Every structure is written in C-alpha cells, then in structure tokens.
Image (cartoon, helix red, strand yellow):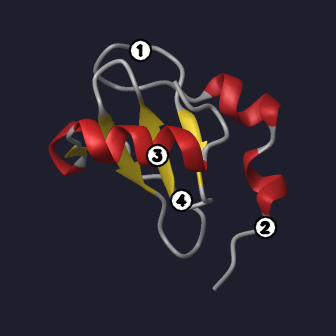
C-alpha cells in the first residue's frame, strides 16, 4: 500500500524526533525515518505509523547510509 506523502509533510517531520538523540529525522521512501547522525533507521508501518522504539530501530553501515541519503535526496 502506497503511503500518502502528505501524512509526512515538513510540519509533521519538524515535530518528530529521534528518541535517542532527540534530533531531526529524514523521511526516506515513505518507508523509513532515518537519523543520519546515529545511522539508525525507524520503520513506518503500512498505516503510516512510525515505530520510534530504539530497540526496534536498525543500525546501518556506510553503504546503506549513502543509499538512504541518496534516496532521501540529501546525498552527503
């Protein structure tokens, strides 16, 4: 099911924060919220609800970090 991108507009993204460092998150493919500082990604379920539990987050390596940032349109 494709997520309606309007669910995660800039205003909502500004309110969401990483539960670990409390910094901003980057939306990737309407499927992940990503913290590039800690290189951790948080899943968004099929109903558009983000799972921001630290224990459920996924740590990514350098290659996946680069891929996520490119897909988010913020290659660094």
Name which residue lies at 62% across and 59% down.
Answer: 30
State the separation of the CA atoms marked 4 and 3: 19 Å
As drawn, is 17 to the left or to the right of 57?
right
Tag of residue 22: 1
Question: Taking the image as drawn, is residue 53 in sight?
Answer: no
Please say if the residues under marks 3 and 1 sit with CB atoms less than 8 Å apart: no
Quick one: label 4 or label 3, which is nearer the N terminus?
4
Name which residue lies at 60% across and 43% down.
Answer: 27
State the separation of the CA atoms marked 2 and 3: 20 Å
- Between circles 3 and 1, the one closer to the viewer is 3
Q: Which residue is mark 2?
A: 4
Name which residue lies at 46% across and 46% down.
Answer: 68
Q: Residues within 10 Å of mark 3 (few under 14, many from 20)?
A: many
State the separation of the CA atoms marked 3 and 1: 20 Å
State the separation of the CA atoms marked 2 and 4: 12 Å
Write down the quadrant of residue 22 in the picture: top left
Q: Which residue is mark 3?
A: 68
* Coordinates of residue 14 in the picture (x, y in percent): 69, 23
Q: Which residue is mark 4?
A: 49
* Coordinates of residue 34 in the picture (x, y in percent): 44, 38
Question: Taking the image as drawn, is residue 33 in sight?
Answer: yes
Q: Using the image as rendered, state which of residue 72 and residue 6 is in the foreground.
A: 72
Please say if the residues under marks 2 and 4 sit with CB atoms less than 8 Å apart: no
State the separation of the CA atoms marked 4 and 1: 18 Å
Quick one: label 1 or label 2, which is nearer the N terminus?
2
Quick one: label 2 or label 4, which is nearer the N terminus?
2
């Amino acid at each position: 099911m494709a997520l309606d991108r309007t669910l995660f507009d800039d205003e909502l993204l500004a309110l969401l924060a990483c539960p670990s460092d409390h910094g901003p998150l980057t939306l990737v493919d309407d499927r992940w919220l990503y913290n590039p500082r800690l290189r951790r990604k948080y899943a968004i379920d099929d109903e558009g609800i983000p799972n921001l539990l630290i224990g459920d987050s996924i740590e990514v390596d350098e290659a996946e970090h680069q891929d996520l940032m490119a897909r988010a349109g913020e290659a660094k």
